[in-house]
Image: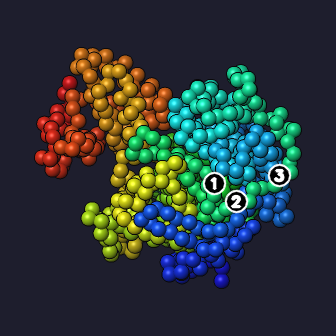
Amino acid sequence: MSYYKIDNLEQYFKHYNKSVREPRKFWGKIAQENFTWYQQWDKVVEFDMAEADIKWFTEAKVNIVKNCIDRHLAKRGDKTAIIFEPNDPSETALHITYNELHERVCKMANVLREQGVKKGDRVCIYLPMIPELAIATLACARIGAIHSVVFAGFSASAVASRINDSECKIVITSDGGYRGNKTIDLKGIIDEALDKCSCVESVLVVKRINSEINMKEGRDQWLQPLLDEASDNNVAEIMDAEDPLFILYTSGSTGKPKGMVHTTAGYMVYTAYTFKNVFNYEENDVFWCTADIGWITGHSYILYGPLLNGATTVIFEGVPSYPDFSRFWEIIEKHKITQFYTAPTAIRALAKENLEYVQKHPLTSLKVIGSVGEPINEEAWHWYNDHVGSKRCPLVDTWWQTETGGILISPIAFVTPTKPTYASLPLPGIQPVLMDDKRNEIEGNQVNGSLCIKFPWPGIARTIWGDHQRYKDTYFSAFPGKYFTGDGALRDEVGYYRITGREDDVVIVSGHNLGTAPIEDAINEHPAVAESAIVGFPHDVKGNALYAFVILKEVGEYRVRENLVKEINQLISDHIGPIAKIDKIQFVTGLPKTRSGKIMRRILRKIAEGDYSNFGDISTLLNPEIVEEIKEGKI
Ligand code: WTA
């Protein structure tokens, strides 16, 4: 019996039970039957949760790109691997076959080697959503270099801190990018970032928008001439199962970038398996995930998961609103998309527009629709289900994280009955538990608590780059012996999970995971600011928006508030990027603090939501009187 594919609910329970009782047999069989290895593993999994030390497929040798591309060539060489849909719909879409992808990745890999990039070196990729982003990422993995893709919406200072944190040797960027009717000056941002990065030896530049840019002698080179010269013959590096595959930065509770490290074999097995099952992938499907490759969703479900299964995957350069709000639906019709995977924030934004945008495009090619990134509210769920899925496509609400590598809790299309706003059941191999404040496991159903996972799965991140202690502290110490997700969840009467939201200092704005600490750090840089606190508050399109409480050094400065708001937002843009802009600023004379000096965000959150009803116990505050003042919005 094969465990790779689940066909019905009964089989799901069978596989699930097997994966809990005999995880080694379960994953060992999946790994053996569905991938190409240079050398088999010694142990399927070895772990010590207290030390946050997790290894899968120890001693195995493998190359993930050989599995993504080379092994498909005999059967699928002429099949389209990547469809590139440009920002401008009048520009021709590209169909890159597996043969062509192989050739382009091999050439890119050879260029990187010629530039002196070796196994284990870090490469920063800062590109728009164009084929070169996929090709550069895969080329790194082919030669064993660790890719660090930085989302092209991050500011120079955010890119610089990420480059420095992992000491990248080389940066791959472009002369710019298109985004709707705007262009973005990526090379200018990199130039500014590199003023602060001494580790970078060279910069390779893709030509995309033909803009006039500065090329620094001895550092910057156009990529195309190097590719033209390169051989398409490339021998892939033989990687150890636990060699790092990539670093991807995510938000944390301090301003220091948190580089999650994913390793090779476990990530490969897990993304392939979850892609195949959650989306009911079958040969000749055309899969479209609208995320950016700069986020984990793009890594796992635009690149690795689909390519490992020999699928056709779509890379879309543009935005849902350009040239108009029918763009997504037009693309589904144009490329006969079978699986469409997007974020609730996009659904909410599109649901606000005229229904005709979606109705004028027959979406009959679709068979599965998916959601990811934040809780999907009931209204958005129904709109998506009714108007995009036509009540005929299963809607898979997939819960997972940068840290988890792949989907953990989700319906399996055509297998698990869906329920609005519920991520439903854990996938095989995933053992969720809900914990109470006293660190006890909450048994039974119709309960809620902090969501933890009590057994490792192949896709879990292995560490934080350069700071294993922080990895241990963040994920394995709140509930000893378990991985703590940072999310709260409830379990309904039949055991379905619904994610209720973050329990820590992370706010999800338009599906982007933002730490409040780095934003506060940026605001505090303003010379007039003494202190600040950021919380999220509900927003009907973005899910959450940011609310800043700001204490100024001198009360006199309140008179120039309007300029201050502009300047503060500019600082945030400079330090992080426009995605972290705040919606509301309230100037205050103090912040509610505990006696140990910790800001009581729970209270600020309630004020930001406009809910003044139940602040809970404020007697432990150092300055309870401040709550009244903030509520009344004096000053
Ligand atoms: C949230 C994105 C509810 C959650 C893959 C998680 C979700 C954080 C869902 C991770 C979902 C993601 N329902 N909440 N289906 N999917 N989240 O690292 O709070 O960008 O912890 O990974 O997004 O965001 P990240």
Image quadrant in which you'd find residue 199: top right
Residue 83 disc label: none
Answer above or below: position of 540 versus 208.
below
Residue at 83% from the left image edge and 33% from the top image edge? 225
Q: Which image quarter holds the N terminus?
A: bottom right
Answer above or below: position of 92 versus 48.
above
In the rendering, at what x and y percent does residue 449 appear?
A: 32, 63
Q: Amino acid at mark 3?
A: Asn
Residue 239 disc label: 2
Lateral position of residue 234 relative to residue 522, left or right: right
Residue at 60% from the left image edge and 64% from the top image edge? 266
Q: Which image quarter holds the C terminus?
A: top left
Find the distance from the CA under tag 3 to the CA under tag 1.
18 Å
Of mark 3 and mark 1, the one earlier in the sequence is 3
Q: Amino acid at mark 1?
A: Leu
Mark 3 — residue?
Answer: 234
Tell us which disc is closer to us: 3 or 2. Answer: 2
Q: Secondary structure at mark 1?
A: strand
Q: Are marks 2 and 1 in contact (CB under 8 Å)?
A: yes
Nearer to us in this view, 229 or 330 = 229
Mark 1 — residue?
Answer: 245
Residue at 55% from the left image edge and 60% from the top image edge? 406
Find the distance from the CA under tag 2 to the CA under tag 1.
9 Å
Nearer to us in this view, 130 or 621 = 621
In this rendering, does residue 66 appear at all? Answer: yes
